[in-house]
Amino acid sequence: MAASTVGRVLSGCKHLWAGQGVQWLRRPAGRTLCGYSSGLGRDPSERQLLQQCTSFHSSSVRNGLDEFFDDPKNWGEKSVKSGDAWTAKQLRGKSNEDLHKLWYVLLKEKNMLLTLEQESKRQRLPMPSPERLSKVGKAMRRLDTVITEREDSLRLLQTGQEKPIPGDWRKDCFGETTWYNYKEWPMPWFMNRGYKKKNFFSLPYVNHFIRLKLEKKLRSAARRNKAEKQKQLDLEGRFPRLANTSK
């Protein structure tokens, strides 16, 4: 008798919990917005607060491929005003975090200008203010130089080494002077056959050819500078008005 009573009670509890579970599953899940559940939106004041929270966005606007093109206000203009390139003195006064952000700003600007240049070539139209591309390039090179200076200074302070990998200047069998980075070997140098095969010296008979190579390099540089000057003079002779304005 007692066993049958307990069985009926357990069966009733089972059906009761099953019914509660089904009701809980059928209940619509409330969406939480800005820390408030959807059930709080019944009051007009609370509903207005929820609308304000949903209309607020903390992330930046993403325009997708539109970022590769210039501002629509500059479309069709023959010239676009732009500031001067960042100087090394100005960049040295910036923190590492600011330089990191500025690098990506310049990279984005460079991508935009390269896209504009390619589109101008495709349509056979002059690019508005092409000097902006050179300014961005100068700023990026100077920024890279400032970062390298800081890394070298920190390395000199901590380790006393100028190069990131220690080494020295060595000559090969042809008399070429190159920088050799030290490497770790599992055996001493006098027992290492691979290291011995590298001749870090040159015989005296190559000195004559080294001088000839240096002379050829200097002559090539002189001819290149002379050709650039002659080209500049020819352009000034063909377009005297532009030559006067550039001066």
Image: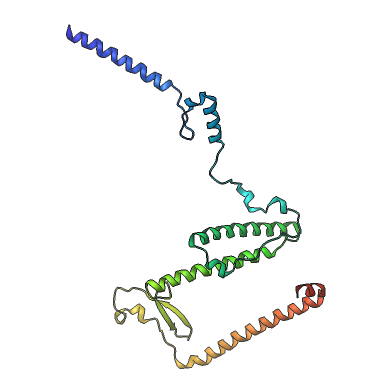
Q: Quadrant of residue 191?
A: bottom left
Look at the picture and state if 162 lies above or below 56. below
Q: Position of residue 70 (x, y in %)?
A: 67, 54
**Count of numbered marks:** 0
Against 95, residue 33 (above or below) is above
Q: Nearer the viewer, residue 194 or 113?
A: 113
Using residue 95 as the reference point, say whether residue 244 is left or right of it. Answer: right
Q: Is residue 148 left or right of residue 11?
A: right
- The one nearer the camera, 150 or 201, is 150
Side of 70 where 26 appears, left or right: left
Q: Residue furthest left?
A: 2
How far from the left and from the top, in percent, is residue 9? 25, 11
Determine whether, in the image, residue 208 is placed left or right of residue 180: right
Viewer-nearest residue: 201 or 167:
167
Q: How is the image coloured?
A: rainbow
Asked if residue 106 is positioned above or below residue 234 in the image, the reply reads above
Q: Position of residue 97 (x, y in %)?
A: 49, 59
Q: Residue 214: image x %, image y %?
A: 56, 87
- Which quadrant of the rendered structure holds the C terminus? bottom right
Q: Which residue: 48% across, 93% down?
A: 205
Q: Name the residue: 32% across, 78% down.
A: 192
Furthest residue in direction front, as rendered: 45
Q: Looking at this rendering, what residue extends furthest in the top direction?
A: 1
- In the picture, the quarter occupied by the N terminus is top left
